[in-house]
Image: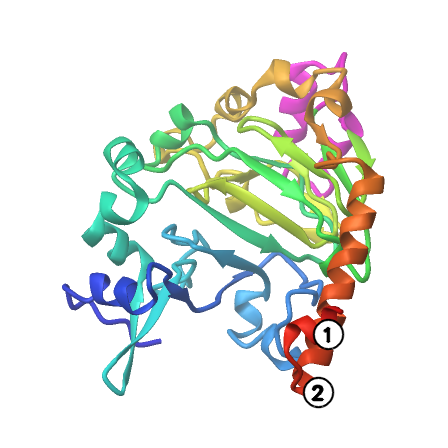
Amino acid sequence: MNITKKTGLAAKALEQGKGILRLAPTWVPRSFCVPGRRIKLHPDDYYILGGNRGGIDERWLSSTTPAKNGPLTGEHEGLSPVIFKDGSTEILLLLKDVIDELKGAIIGDRLWNKHKSWPMYSKFFDNMGPLPHHVHHNDEKAALIGQLGKPEAYYFPPQLNNHGGDFPYTFFGISPGTTKAQIRECLVNFTKGDNKITNFSSAFKLEPGTGWDVPPGMLHAPGSMCTYEPQKASDVFAMYQSLVNEAIIPEELLWNGTPKDKIGDYDELIDVLDWELNVDPNILQTRFMAPKPVRSVKEMKAQAIWKTGFVICRMHLVQKNLPLHQVLR
């Protein structure tokens, strides 16, 4: 992917799109994941970056956040490219460079003045199996490694879940009554096979059309449904589960979000957790998000019928080349 760094093109791209930027897809692999094959890639492309990079199981949307995928990470991995035509030439710019150039003129002065960047992105996460029990750091902890904290949320779109994968259940938090010493022991045992940390958690069945709120500091092991995730502009995380779906998790991912001078300090890993949030006995009531109807079901059904009829009328209009008043008569 040939990205131009030439300045002065950002405004031209925005003008050409009449206020809308065209973004190319941004595909991200994970070495510890098996793709669920629901994000509309060609079957030959899921491992196109090579087996050592793992399968592509994430598509990032409107991202100015580089992916943190270790030493083999590509130069622009995770960063959304903007596409536009400069005469007959197709140009690719990074969305990050566009926003850095146009600042408040594109994202608004409030966001630019506060963050000096585009402060979020979203993704489709598409894994065949569950992820390990892991945590995203809050702003204070993430700042120690030069990142932002990472709150996120889940939504399971029915349109992308033609199958639920191998394990459509997500572990959230830590069972009430569990002690920090018990979780610390699991972390100390990370390299001894299965550290059994999910013995101290509860799993919830995932339902298409619903969602969950996942604040930073909360342990969670995402299940195998294709998930839409809006989140803060950060890729900070640490894996606290050593074995998932019979796959060993590398120890480096346990210390992934830890400052170099704290690696080996298991108390630091415990301190990353928001303990009260994790042992909340009412996680289902406080973090689960059921769909909310925008109006009564009767009204929505009536509107859907009307819209369907209108679409049929439009199709008939085009096919017969009739004026609209004749079609609707």
The residue at 42%/63% (across/down) is 72
What's under tag 1, amino acid-wise? Val
Q: Nearer the viewer, residue 251 or 3?
A: 3
Regarding residue 218, the answer to whether it shows in the image is: yes
Q: Say whether residue 307 is left or right of residue 64.
A: right
Q: Which residue is mark 1?
A: 327
Q: Which residue is mark 2?
A: 320
Residue 169's image quarter? top right
Residue 235 forms part of the magenta stretch: no
First in sequence, mark 2 or 1: give its number. Answer: 2
Above or below, 148 relative to 305 = above
Above or below, 273 relative to 165 = above
Residue 134's image quarter? top right
Q: Secondary structure at mark 2?
A: helix
Q: Quadrant of the C terminus?
A: bottom right
The residue at 81%/49% (across/down) is 302
Residue 144's image quarter? top left
Estimate the x, y position of residue 49 in percent, counting from the top left.
51, 74
The Cα–Cα distance between marks 2 and 1, rounded to whole angstroms, is: 9 Å
Which region shows up in magenta? 174-201
